[in-house]
Image (spheres, grey):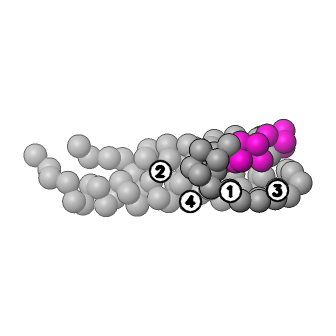
Amino acid sequence: MKLNPMRVGVSLGALMGLWHLTWSGLVAAGLAKPLMDFVLMIHFIRLDIGFAPFDVQLAALLVVVTSLFGFAFGWVFAVVWNSVTRRD
């Protein structure tokens, strides 16, 4: 199966952007620390993690940067996949 690098890049970029948009929403709502405390607890990890106040500009930068990295990773993945898979 041949992958379209642009479609894979856009799909992974959108997924990564949405994931980090959700994270930013959790930080803005004050739910990030309780969630992280729970996730760490069920992994038997105890850390004292502090969270900075929510900043909309940093949140936007986070979403943009992770979307771009997701796109790049997806594009490279598709190109490599297409180069190593058998063509019938």
Give the class, few, some or many, for how many residues have Cα within 10 Å of label 2's Cα (few <14, many ≥20): many
Horizontally, residue 32 falls left or right of residue 11, namely right
Q: Is residue 74 magenta?
A: no
- Dot 3 falls on a residue whose secondary structure is loop
Residue 10 location (% of width, % of height): 51, 46
Q: Nearer the viewer, mark 2 or mark 3?
A: 3
Chain part drawn in magenta: 28-37
5 or 64, which lies in front?
A: 64
Identified by mark 2, the residue type is: Gly
Residue at coordinates 84% horizontally, 42% vertically from top-left?
A: 30
Above or below: residue 53 compared with residue 39? below
Q: Is residue 31 magenta?
A: yes
Q: Nearer the viewer, mark 1 or mark 3?
A: 1
Residue at coordinates 20% horizontally, 54% vertically from top-left?
A: 85
Q: Nearer the viewer, mark 2 or mark 4?
A: 4
Per the image, the residue denoted by label 1 is: 46
- Number of dots carrying numbers: 4
Residues under labels 2 and 3: Cα distance? 31 Å
Per the image, the residue denoted by label 3 is: 51
Residue at coordinates 14% horizontally, 50% vertically from top-left?
A: 87
Q: Earlier in the sequence, mark 2 or mark 4?
A: 2
Give the class, few, some or many, for how many residues have Cα within 10 Å of label 1's Cα (few <14, many ≥20): few
Residues under labels 1 and 3: Cα distance? 16 Å
Specify the label residue 9 is tagged with: 2
Per the image, the residue denoted by label 4 is: 69
Q: Earlier in the sequence, mark 1 or mark 3?
A: 1
Asked if the residue under mark 4 is in contact with the one under mark 2, i.e. CB atoms within 8 Å, the reply is no
Identified by mark 1, the residue type is: Arg
Asked if the residue under mark 1 is in contact with the one under mark 4, i.e. CB atoms within 8 Å, the reply is no
